[in-house]
Amino acid sequence: MSVGRQAQPVVEAIEAVAAPVLESHGLTLVDVELAGGGRRSVLRFYLDKPGGVTIDDCQRFSREIGDLLDVEDLVRGSFDLEVSSPGLDRELHKDRELAWAVGREVRAWTREPIDGRREFVGRLVEVGEAFLTLAEAASRRQVPRALLTKVRLEAEPKRSV
């Protein structure tokens, strides 16, 4: 789910309110989604930290951010708050998500073949404005962002034997 253009200023305000809470707990914001509308919206936070996010981390953050959001009244109407880790095979959309994934194994698909291939797997080493750079075995490959259709974390990195 993605945030509509109208909701983007709301999401940015939510991120600003969340920043000190995240920092105080040593958490990194991977993504925020505001979905739905009308009678009830869903506000999702995806968090990470070195060593991984625990259930206790999610519960603490949820309590604190829930209280702050109630005071700030940034989300119209009722909403459900969900807090979790990003997941092992998360699809990456935003620059912040891609930057978070640097150093991790990813799988990327392109709409047109590059050197006869449309699927690439490697360690994400750089996120540029025009390219993603992947380390594949002993080489590096630049994949044009304009050709990307999907980028996803690899659940189990492939290891050489």
Image (cartoon, rainbow, N blue to C red):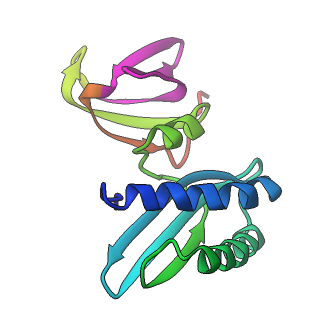
Quadrant of image for the C terminus = top right
Residue lying farthest to the front in this orientation? 72
**Looking at the image, which residue is at 30% across and 35% down?**
109
Question: As drawn, which residue projects farthest toward the left?
Answer: 112
Q: Quadrant of residue 72?
A: bottom right
Q: Which residues are magenta?
A: 118-145
User: What kind of secondary structure does the magenta stretch mostly adopt?
Assistant: strand
Q: Vertical placement of 144 versus 62: above or below?
A: above
Q: Is residue 53 above or below residue 98?
A: below
**Residue 50, horizontal then vertical, whole percent:** 76, 47
In the rendered structure, does residue 126 fall within the stretch colored magenta?
Answer: yes
Position of 78 compared to 71: left or right? left
- The picture places residue 154, in percent across and down from the top left corner, at 49, 44
Q: Can residue 61 be seen by looking at this rendering? A: yes
In the displayed structure image, the side of residue 13 where residue 20 appears, left or right: right
Q: State the residue at coordinates (21%, 18%).
A: 116
Q: Residue at 41%, 49% (x, y): give it.
A: 91
Who's the residue at 59% across and 40% down the image?
100
- Residue 57 in the image, given as x and y percentages of width and height: 75, 67
Quadrant of image for the N terminus: bottom left
Q: How many numbered markers are drawn?
A: 0
Looking at the picture, tell me which residue is in the foreground, 61 or 150.
61
In the image, taking residue 23 as reference, residue 11 lies left or right, namely left
- Res 158 seen here: no
Relative horizontal placement of residue 21, taking residue 103 as reference (left or right): right
Q: What is the x, y in percent for residue 125?
A: 56, 23
Is residue 10 covered in magenta? Answer: no
